[in-house]
Amino acid sequence: MAAVAVFGFTNINAQDDKTTGGFANGDVYASGSIGFNSAKFGEAKSNSLEFSPAVGFFISDNIALEVNLLIGSGEDANDDKTSSFGGGLGATYFFTPAGQFSFTLGAGVAYQTSKEEFNGGGEAKFNTFGFAVAPGVNYFVSDCIALRASIGALSYASSKLDGADDASTNFGLNLDLSNIDFGITYKF
C-alpha cells in the first residue's frame, strides 16, 4: 500500500499538465473487490475469500453511493466449510476525486445469509446484519480504469442462528494487514 501511495503521489506531481482519470458529480462506475482473510491460532488456521461486485453513482463531487453483492466462502482448521451471499448499500467519500490518486473513506450496511457445513455432517444457517467504516485508496491507471484498496475496518455485526432466540454481536477495529480488499473500478 505504501508503494502505491508513493507511486501515486510522484505521478500526481510529475503530471501537472496531463491528468489521467478522476471522478466528478454524475459519474457512474462498476467495481469489484476481492478480500482475503487468514487467521492462525497455534496450529489451527482458517481462511476466507469474499468477492463483492458493486455499482456506484456520484451524487456530489466527493460522495458516491454504492449498491453491492457479497459472495463468500471459507474453510477452517476442522475442514468445516462456509458459504455466504448477501447485499449492501454504502457511501464513499473521495478526498481528491478529480485527481489520479485519492484517499477514500467508505461506510456501508449489509445483510448476509451464511451456511456452515460441518466436516462430520450437519449444517447451520446464519443471518447477519453489519455496518463498517473503512479507509482506502483509489488510483486511476487510465482515463476509465482505477485500482482500489481498503485496509481493515471499524465494524459491527449481529448474527443470528436460524431457530435461535439470541444473536451474537461482534465489534471490531482492524487496521492491520490481516484484512485487505483489492478491487478494480471501471468508470463509464
Image: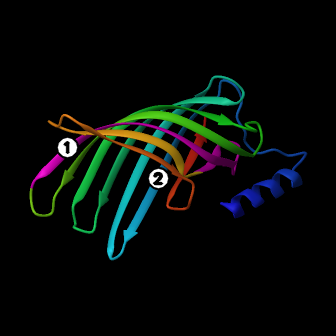
Q: How many marks?
A: 2
* Residue depicted at 57% across the width and 44% down the height: 134
* Residue depicted at 83% across the width and 58% down the height: 10
Q: Is residue 83 left or right of residue 11?
A: left
Q: Nearer the viewer, residue 151 or 12?
A: 151
* Residue depicted at 68% across the width and 23% down the height: 60
Position in image of residue 67 (x %, y %): 47, 31
Q: Nearer the viewer, residue 44 or 167?
A: 167
- 134 falls in the magenta region: yes
Residue at the spot of label 1: 125
Decide which of tag 2 and tag 1 comes sooner along the chain. 2
Quarter of the image containing the C terminus? Answer: top right
Q: From which residue to which does the magenta span run?
A: 122-149
Q: Is residue 148 left or right of residue 168?
A: right
Three-letter residue code for mark 2: Ile
Q: Is residue 65 left or right of residue 43?
A: right
Three-letter residue code for mark 1: Lys
Mark nearer the viewer, 2 or 1: 1
Q: Nearer the viewer, residue 48 or 133?
A: 133
State the mark number for residue 34. Answer: 2
State the mark number for residue 15. Answer: none
Secondary element type, mark 2: strand
Q: Main secondary structure of the magenta part?
A: strand
Position in image of residue 129 (x %, y %): 36, 35
Q: Give the spatial CA distance, label 2 vs label 1.
A: 23 Å
Whether residue 140 is situated above or below residue 119 in the rendered picture = above
Position in image of residue 140 (x %, y %): 69, 48
* Residue depicted at 62% across the width and 47% down the height: 136
Q: Nearer the viewer, residue 47 or 18?
A: 47
